[in-house]
Amino acid sequence: MNRIAVLGTGNVGDTVGSKLIELGYSVLMGSRTQNNEKALAFVAKHNDKACAGTFADAAEYGEIIFNCTKGLASLEALHMAGEDNLKDKIIVDLANPLDFSNGMPPTLSVCNSNSLGEEIQKAFPSAKVVKALNTIWCGVMVNPGMINNGDHNTFLSGNDAAAKEKVKEILIAFGWKESNILDLGDITTARGTEMYLALWVRIMGATNSGAFNLKIVR
């Protein structure tokens, strides 16, 4: 699987998409419009090794889809991508349902008995949703070695074991140690990683940095 769709033109989409191109993947960055300025800048930055289009263009193109949209917009973006274009494909969901409508710190639009990962899986039952990398800043996502020599943890949640193994391969290519990638279980376990964001944003506020992560010590 060499063709990857990156949905979203923000820092996460740019950082993840750039790393995927560096690793030799072909990337189409998707947005709401055909000629999104940030998506076109992403293409230009990579000397035309990338391409850009709508969410639907990207989802049709990609064999794997990285959801790097803002969490409150993720379902809308994926519906714009089209159910047929997502059928039987892996959706790597990096988003968190952060609600900034009442300012900082944000709350979660879904939590406790539900998660964004589950909502995406319910909306697109034929897709294989894997929640991943949503507990860390995008710089650490693609360069875990910047902290503690890469000795810290990241998590996977999803219903399809083969899909999780494929995502794990990509994470290892990003630099994650296989022993530090913890499979939490089915997609309902995304509730825990998404709710961690309530603590994450407060740690970031207290340290003025997003360059930190968890290490499980037993």
Image (cartoon, rainbow, N blue to C red):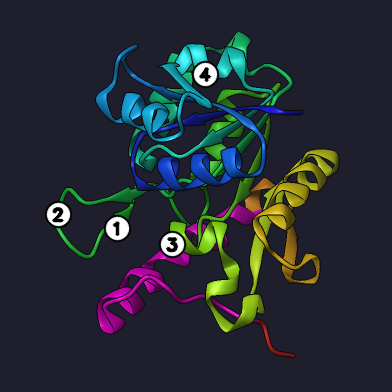
Q: Which mark is residue 58?
A: 4
Q: Are marks 1 and 3 in contact (CB under 8 Å)?
A: no
Q: CA distance from mark 3 to mark 4?
A: 24 Å
Image location of residue 26, percent across then percent down: 62, 27
Quadrant holding the C terminus: bottom right
* SS category of the residue bearing label 3: loop
- Label 2, residues with CA under 10 Å away: few <14, some 14-19, many ≥20: few
Q: Three-letter amino acid code at disc 4?
A: Ala
| For marks 2 and 3 on the same chain, the one whose residue lies earlier in the sequence | 2
Please name which of the two marks, 2 or 4, marks the residue nearer to the observer: 4
- The magenta stretch is 189-215
Q: Can you identify the residue that label 3 sits on?
A: 137
Q: CA distance from mark 4 to mark 1?
A: 30 Å
Q: CA distance from mark 1 to mark 3?
A: 18 Å
* SS category of the residue bearing label 2: loop
Q: Which mark is residue 102?
A: 2
